[in-house]
Amino acid sequence: MSEFQFPTEMVELPSKGLIYPKDHPLRSGKVEMKYMTAKEEDILSNQNLIKKGVVLEKLLESLIQGKFDTKSLSTGDKNAVFIASRILGYGKDYTFIHGDEKITVDLATIESKPFNENIIDENGFINFTLPKSETNVKFKILSEKEEDDIKVEIKNLSKFKGKGSGEVTVRLKHQIVSVDGKEDKTEIKNFVDNYMLAQDSRALRNYVKEISPDVDMSYILDNGEEITIPIGVGFFWPDL
């Protein structure tokens, strides 16, 4: 019997692939995904994977066609892939509970946030001049793998009394790739720890949040309240 070929779809990434290294498969700005099958339903219902918190990662590994670590996706691009996965698997209508209200949204209407590709250099980095010190820094959009590394580092730092969580500085050290053209990691660390003004730190973090490629997961309720459409195991299989 010849091997059965599952139909696939190309999913466009909010980042257009520009935030990834030149030789990375994601640089194309698109991801090929196959339609969900009973195999993926087995993954979604695997209690061991659910308890470990890796069930959605395993789902993407099964659906995405291409040889790369799914954790190399940025958070925003991964959100786009999750939405495409849900539509390909169970259709565009998604119902969830908010408070006492049952809400149904059309996932096909969700769009990517505006993304200015002109701010990205050829290496996928972005320039920003700190408003107070007028220091020029270059930063990158973090991948899921880097986000995980940051969480581990912050958790380890929190074990030392008097050191604080390090949540702000650890993230900045991972995100900034150069300071006034200097790419040495030791110099970047020294700048963040000793010379990064609070006003500049906040300005940079706000700018990163503003320009980061993502999908618009906001939803306006009838009463005018704005909420975020939740993504979890139930997003893919409401009966779980």
Image (cartoon, helix red, strand yellow):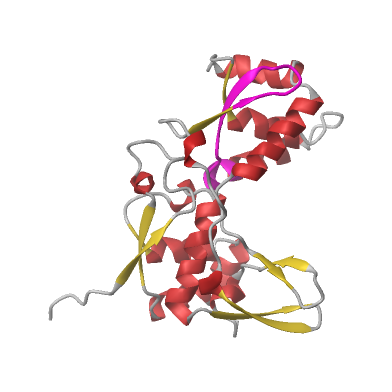
Among the 4 quarters of the image, the one containing residue 155? top right
Q: Is residue 153 visible?
A: no
Q: Using residue 52 as the reference point, say whether residue 60 is left or right of it.
A: left
Residue 219, image x and y in percent? 69, 69
Residue 166, image x and y in percent? 76, 33
Quadrant of the frame with the N terminus: bottom left
115 vs 122: above or below: below
Which residue is nearer to you in this view: 15 or 20?
A: 15
Among the 4 quarters of the image, the one containing residue 232? bottom right
Residue 66, image x and y in percent? 32, 55
Q: Is residue 130 magenta?
A: yes
Q: Which residues are magenta?
A: 128-147
66 vs 45: above or below: above
Q: Residue furthest left?
A: 1
Q: What residue sits 51% from the left and 56% below the top?
A: 78
State the count of labels. Answer: 0
Q: Residue furthest right?
A: 162
Q: What residue sits 35% from the left and 36% below the top?
A: 22
Among the 4 quarters of the image, the one containing residue 238? bottom right
Quadrant of the frame with the C terminus: bottom right
Residue 26, image x and y in percent? 38, 47
185 vs 52: above or below: above
Q: Is residue 105 magenta?
A: no
Q: Using residue 98 as the reference point, say whether residue 18 is left or right of it.
A: left
Q: Is residue 11 visible?
A: yes
210 vs 32: above or below: above
Q: What residue sits 54% from the left and 63% below the top?
A: 111
